[in-house]
Image (cartoon, coloured by chain):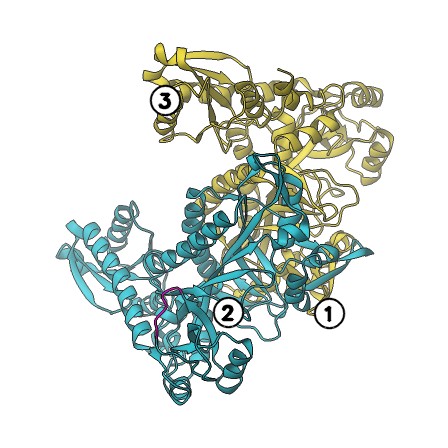
Chain colours: A cyan, B yellow
Amino acid sequence: MAKEKKLVEAITAMDEDFAQWYTDVVKKAELIEYSSVKGCMILRPNGYAIWENIQKVLDSQFKETGVENVAMPMFIPESLLEREKDHVEGFAPEVAWVTHGGNKKLEERLCVRPTSETLFCDFYSNIIQSYRDLPKLYNQWVSVVRWEKSTRPFLRTSEFYWQEGHTAHATADEAEERTVQMLNMYADFCEQYLAIPVVKGQKTEKEKFAGANATYTIEALMHDGKALQSGTSHNFGDGFAKAFDIQYTDKNNKLQYVHQTSWGMSTRIIGAIIMVHGDDSGLVLPPKIAPVQTMIVPIMQKKEGVLEKAEEIRARLSKNYKVKVDDSDKSPGWKFSEQEVQGIPTRIEIGPKDIEKNQAVIVRRDTREKIIVSLDEIETKLSEVLGQMQSDMLERAKKHLEANTHEAADWDEFKEIIDKQQGFVKAMWCGETECEEAIKDETGATTRCMPFEQEHLGDVCVHCGKPAKKMVLFGKAY
Amino acid sequence: MAKEKKLVEAITAMDEDFAQWYTDVVKKAELIEYSSVKGCMILRPNGYAIWENIQKVLDSQFKETGVENVAMPMFIPESLLEREKDHVEGFAPEVAWVTHGGNKKLEERLCVRPTSETLFCDFYSNIIQSYRDLPKLYNQWVSVVRWEKSTRPFLRTSEFYWQEGHTAHATADEAEERTVQMLNMYADFCEQYLAIPVVKGQKTEKEKFAGANATYTIEALMHDGKALQSGTSHNFGDGFAKAFDIQYTDKNNKLQYVHQTSWGMSTRIIGAIIMVHGDDSGLVLPPKIAPVQTMIVPIMQKKEGVLEKAEEIRARLSKNYKVKVDDSDKSPGWKFSEQEVQGIPTRIEIGPKDIEKNQAVIVRRDTREKIIVSLDEIETKLSEVLGQMQSDMLERAKKHLEANTHEAADWDEFKEIIDKQQGFVKAMWCGETECEEAIKDETGATTRCMPFEQEHLGDVCVHCGKPAKKMVLFGKAY
């Protein structure tokens, strides 16, 4: 068994060193490979297939609400990036600059897009003339570049993959509606497909997106008690429209500025899947998003009829599920380890004795429960197991979120929780950026959001004692 | 009607100025918009949706042959690009260089990928150890950058979208098989989905890909008689493997170099769709690849029941087709023009009189044929019309290809054809690069390929009179 155990043994235990566990899992599950380009990762087939599944679901949900896909250039001329004051301040320090093209020095430097508001604004100013041209509901699936000093796979890399939606509307109300609609779509997607519960809320002035009037966010809680910002939606009001002169003629023939939004979800969310559901044996993928939902492992596959039966089961299950047969020349134990490390939700073991009894064994990745099923009803049984696993995973994640969300009535309690218990801390806040910064300096915790579901935990700020304005969700974050 | 005709009138006639016609069509059909980034285009929803449909079909065909998708970094360190001598010579002069990241000068320049062989090789050298790891059949859908001096939408832009497949195999035979397999897949895709017939063949030494042993190509003929290289597949042999030290241990425990291929199809192919099928009213999209297959145009839509009936038909047809209703406040004539400019394969006109008679009018975009159909059988009739249109389009394109493919027995005939008739010219060639260059200098025609289907047109080279080695397809090209 020594050889079979190698894969699992190579993964550091979560409780021993969570960061190392994470790094081990992304490598052993073959999600990523480090590249020769500092800070950039290679998404291997196992990793990219998860992203493809995320794309498929979100893209079709976007399109149902009228969103259309486009493709914008990957470069932004320096003068265009500088057009909106807050935005350039937020992004200029972390962009990559192209200075030469085709062996010649460029007249104007181009940055590789860190995000594409400026490009979309430039585009919108050309194509929007009349109220008839509104709304514009555009999205693109691309990679963006932000030069990061220290990087971690999925969580923080110099290049990462995302979708960025950019919309232009006739009225402020419509823009606000779209901003909230997309945040809700992200939240529902996380719960229903990724089995990750999130807290919805608004970012503080300090934490909001560069150039936005308001940034809404969904915050998820990882296994180690740290927060991960998992998707954001921004309402720009008419700030960008004024900077880029995006006006339309309304029905009364009057010129009006448009109101804009943008919203994004990135490959970061794969980091959340790993850190919410993974265990000491590796990845655990929610069935609804898993590229392979069940791996059939033939036992004693050289015996006559075993591989044939495995293939027959695969063909039957393939009508409704993503199924593979591992018919490689590795041992069954080694195959089990690989299926577990890669987080494939279920495996089906089938050997000569099972075939004799017209049965197979379904093994759940999360609970390791073994379910003996008759081959006659394997379709319905697999369906039940995958459905149950999906909902159990969400339930467990919800319990973890609840158990690790605390309330702090005063500053001592706040510090105690952040130090000892970790997780989210709900507390009242005065609304001052200075106070927010002091809290961060003293504890390392940042304001994750001002939850939409406000509670009245007290009258004064947990830190400075001034009258409280909002209940805030605090936490240490990735 | 003045207003209604504007859209169409704005398109220059093909015969008057083909280049201007092309530019007018890409703009008026809202496929692209020029951006503030020199040489880069914006793919608008109409343009990007065509690319999405191409992706959907090709991606699933790739996957059926075992190909998996990955995502590689968009940057290549200068030292990595330089590793394979022929390759760097081919690409270094046309790349964009990133010299600064996050306000700091980089220790090593990074180029924005012009193609990703070097990245894949670096990756493969890390992950391939044993024969068990082979083959690797990876692909990515990305944009690449080649700094172009003069650009034209789809045909030649500094940034363009494509897929690039990169495979590694245990044997030379297997690599060759994959190279041909992918070329055939491209050719079949062009015929079956895009209604574009192509000529398959091998590139000459001069025209082959930088670093390849052999480059295979599909060449299509545009309406104006110019050729468009529409997809290529390269066999690298073990050249890159030696430069990047990609070795595996075979079953006899001996170290062997892998054999590699790469193959790509790009957004250029949208240029081919436009220039093969378009007419003086704009774009004509093959039904199988059209983002919208039929546009329902209600006539007198304010009359009670008209919009409801249009919506009812849309709902019925939507089960099998991509259908929209144009219920905007524009006139029917204006809507017809838009549908025609955008190349939507059919429109369905339905007004109060039609409703009375329980009928509608299907109008084909290519022939303008009007077909009155009973609403009871509109599904089957639309199916017939779209099927007929798809095959008619291919037939017309085939006839155009045949009518414009000539044979040149001697040099005078060759020059005569290239000057007067345009199109493809088949002629015998000695196999010398010098002679190939002389032909180009004298006539502007290049070797498009050495067709797989060779014919014996004579014994000597059409240009120099030396013994002929191959029949070559010549043409002026985009």
Q: Position of residue A87 (x, y in %)?
A: 64, 61
Residue A207 visible in rendering = yes
**Which residue is under mark 3?**
B309
* Crowd tier of the residue under label 1, counting other residues whose Cα lies within 10 Å: few below 14, some 14–19, many 20 or above: few
**Bounds of the magenta span?**
A452-456
Q: Amino acid at mark 3?
A: Lys
List x then y, in percent, for residue B268.
64, 38
Q: Position of residue B308 (x, y in %)?
A: 36, 24
Evaluate whether label 3 is on the same chain as label 2. Answer: no
- Give the alpha-carbon distance from disc 3 to disc 2, as whole Å: 50 Å
For residue A107, side relative to residue A398 (left or right): right
Q: Amino acid at mark 1?
A: Glu
Quadrant containing the N terminus of chain B is top right
Q: Which residue is mark 2?
A: A204
User: What chain does mark 3 sit on?
Assistant: B
- Chain of the residue that carries numbered disc 2 in the rendered image: A
- What residue appears at the point 50 percent right and 29 percent down from the top-left corner? B192
Tell me the element at label 2: loop
Residue displayed at 35% across by 31% down: B319
The circle drawn on residue B108 is 1
Chain letter of disc 1? B
x, y percent for residue B459: 76, 26
